[in-house]
Amino acid sequence: MLNMNDIVGSHDIVMITLDTLRYDVAVLEQDNCPHLCESGGWEKRHTPGSFTYAAHHAFFGGFLPTPANTDKASHVRLFHGKHSGLRTHPNTWLFDAPDIVSGLAQEGYRTICIGGVIFFTKKNKLSRVLPGYFQQSYWRMNFGVTNPNSTANQVDHALKLLDGISEQEKLFLFMNVSAIHGPNHYYIPNNRRDSVESQRAALRYVDGELGRLFASLRERERPVLCLVFSDHGTAYGEDGYEGHRLAHEVVWNVPYREFFL
């Protein structure tokens, strides 16, 4: 169990959401993801939201995916807002702000968002809400779901930003990875339909690109806590369902990992 009171202030924190990644897909590809699963496997959790906008509102409020079990002792939140009237665990970091991003900024962190899917595009008022939490936020067309090289482009941008950040400065880096979200059929040659298999191929691609980001983060003087998880899954015809923003186990069950670099 992490003690976030020992981590906040002493570690850089990186949060990566693998948008739309199903738990079952993550487990199937576990052995093929040496960067994401170098030090362990995925934990099964339940997401607080069935689509990106809802889930990320919860995440930035401190409500990360919840362990998929009935053992309340394992349901310890890493982050919790002060003055909520609810009991908290001694290992939980309490922030006196509306969200963890501004709470970390109050602790001297530089907060950076590298967006991916439509809710981070800043093209309208709704899509400015989530990136608006951050001191710095970035989105480009080539970060989005229609670009097969989106994760490479996102990581390239992150590496340029890291080059300009002092080793002494505390960093909270958030990245919403869009490649696993549909359309992902193009990660299998001559394929025209999204499926479990094409999402598996997309995850393998993402893992390879994130390896470059992790390598760069390891070079920083400050230790790094990585929180990597999906915001929701998606249905590919299970019980007649397609897509997400619906109540089905393939949507609500998500992979979750926390590890140090």
Image (cartoon, rainbow, N blue to C red):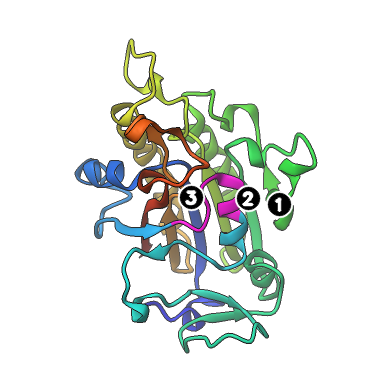
* Residue at image mark 1: 136
Three-letter amino acid code of the residue under disc 1: Gln
Residue 113 to residue 25: above or below? below
- Residue stretch rendered in magenta on the structure: 47-56
Residue 164 shows in this picture: no
Residue 231: mark: 3
Q: In the rendered view, does 139 fall on the left or right side of 68?
A: right
Tag 2 near tag 3, CB within 8 Å:
no
Q: Earlier in the sequence, mark 2 or mark 3?
A: 2
CA separation, marks 2 and 1? 6 Å
Residue drawn at (44%, 68%) of the image: 223
CA separation, marks 1 and 3? 22 Å
- Say few, some or many: other residues with alpha carbon within 10 Å of mark 3 (under 14 / 14 to 19 / 20 or more): many
Q: Earlier in the sequence, mark 1 or mark 3?
A: 1
Tag 1 near tag 3, CB within 8 Å:
no
Q: Where is residue 109, by image quadrant?
A: bottom right
Label 1: element kind = strand
Residue 76 to residue 65: above or below? below
The one of 123 and 58 positioned closer to us in this rendering: 58
* Residue at image mark 2: 113
Q: Position of residue 21 (x, y in %)?
A: 40, 42
Q: Position of residue 228 (x, y in %)?
A: 42, 55
Three-letter amino acid code of the residue under disc 2: Cys
Three-letter amino acid code of the residue under disc 3: Asp
Residue 139 shows in this picture: yes
Q: Where is residue 20, by image quadrant?
A: top left
Tag 2 near tag 1, CB within 8 Å:
yes
Asked if residue 244 is among those painted magenta in the image, a careful observer would answer: no
Q: Where is residue 95, by image quadrant?
A: bottom right
Label 3: element kind = loop
Q: Position of residue 74 (x, y in %)?
A: 35, 76
- Residue extending farthest to the front is 239
